[in-house]
Amino acid sequence: MNNNVNLLAAMAVTPSTASRQGKPASWYEVMAEAWGKTLDAKAHEIESAANEMAGGNDSPAHITQMTALAQQMGFMSNSAHTSLQSVGTALETMARKQ
C-alpha cells in the first residue's frame, strides 16, 4: 500500500505530461489520474488474490487477506470520491467568486 500512497503523492505534486488537445492537464486532472492508478493497482491485487482462490488456495488466511484487500479498496474508493468532490466543490466556489 505504501507504493500506492507514494504514487498518489508524487503525481499530485509532479506536473502531468498528459495533455488535452495540446493543453497541459490541470493539477485536478493529475489528482484524479493518480487516484485512478492507485485504485487500479489495488484492483489488480484483488484480482490476483481471487485467481489464487480459484486455483484452490481457499485457506482461512487467504480468505482473510482477500477481505482485507476488499476493505482497503472500499476505503480508498471512498477517499478518492471525497477528495475529488471536495476539491471540485472548492474550485466551483472559487470560480463563482471571480
Image (cartoon, grey):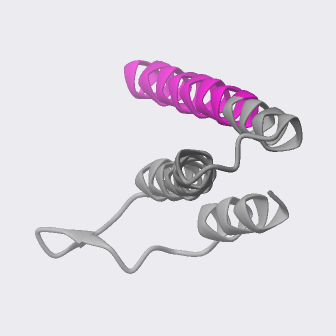
The answer to whether 35 is drawn above or below residue 10 in the figure is above
- Residue at image x 63%, y 23%? 78
Query: How many numbered callouts?
Result: 0
Q: Nearer the viewer, residue 56 or 79?
A: 56
- Residue 91 magenta-drawn? yes
Question: Where, by quadrant of the figure, is residue 5 drawn?
Answer: bottom right
> Which one is in front, 42 or 16?
42
The C terminus lies in quadrant = top left
64 left or right of 69? right
Q: Position of residue 36 (x, y in %)?
A: 47, 50
| Residue 28 or residue 72, whichever sits in front | 72
Q: Is residue 95 left or right of residue 11?
A: left
Quadrant of the image occupied by residue 69: top right
Residue at 85% over, 34% down: 60
Residue 65, compared with residue 31, is above or below; it is above
Q: Residue at x 52, y 75 (%)?
A: 15
Q: Is residue 30 above or below residue 82?
A: below
Task: Please tell me whether the stretch drawn in magenta is mainly helix, strand or loop.
Answer: helix
> Picture coordinates of residue 14 (x, y %)?
60, 75
Residue 35 in magenta?
no
Q: Residue furthest right?
A: 61
Q: Quadrant of the N terminus?
A: bottom right
* Magenta span of residues: 71-98
